[in-house]
Amino acid sequence: MREVRNYEVFKKAHQLTLEVYRLTAAFPQGEAFGLVQQMRRAAYSIPTNLSEGSAREGEKEFAQFVNVAVGSCEEIRYQLLLSRDLRYITDADYEALESEYESVKKMLTRLYQKLKGKK
């Protein structure tokens, strides 16, 4: 069985999830059941899917969960843009997190390709 917690992409996604929780704690109360929930769900979906997928026996099944994590990564990237444009986060926070999530997306894509046997 794979120990996904040793994967760099898992570690990075977990740290980013903690950062999303920190940032969204300061969002307006009216967003508590809207954007805050959506952003947190998208953020923790990445390491959650890696964890669940890693427990599967086959590479094909694991790849499916990695692919879902890629989708969640894109979801949070849009939500960060929306949060910036609504002025819920600063430009600096947006740029830092968006760049980090772009990096996570690339890592996930490489992992997916490796699992699918692509170069």
Image: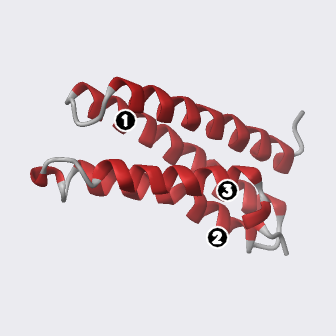
Of circles 3 and 1, the one toward us is 3
Residues packed near mark 3 inside 10 Å, few (<14), some (14 to 19) or many (20 plus):
some
Position of 113 relative to 50 (above/below):
above
Q: Which mark is residue 16?
A: none
Question: What amino acid is at disc 1?
Answer: Leu
Q: Give coordinates of residue 90: x percent, y percent.
A: 31, 29
Quadrant the C terminus occupies = top right
| Mark 2 and mark 3 residues within 8 Å of each other at the beta carbon | no
Position of 84 relative to 32 (above/below):
above
Residue 108 showing in the rendered view: yes
Give the residue at x 64% y 34%: 103
Q: Secondary structure at mark 2?
A: helix
The CA distance from mark 2 to mark 3 is 15 Å
Question: What amino acid is at disc 2?
Answer: Glu
Q: Nearer the viewer, residue 99 or 76?
A: 99
Q: Give coordinates of residue 73: x percent, y percent.
A: 52, 43
Quadrant the N terminus occupies = bottom right
Question: What amino acid is at disc 3?
Answer: Lys
Residues packed near mark 2 inside 10 Å, few (<14), some (14 to 19) or many (20 plus):
some
Determine whether, in the image, residue 27 is placed left or right of residue 40.
Answer: left
Give the residue at x 69% y 34%: 106
Q: Which mark is residue 52?
A: 2
Q: Which mark is residue 80?
A: 1
First along the sequence among labels 3 and 1:
3
Residues packed near mark 1 inside 10 Å, few (<14), some (14 to 19) or many (20 plus):
many
Q: Give coordinates of residue 81: x percent, y percent.
A: 35, 29
What residue is shown with label 3? 11
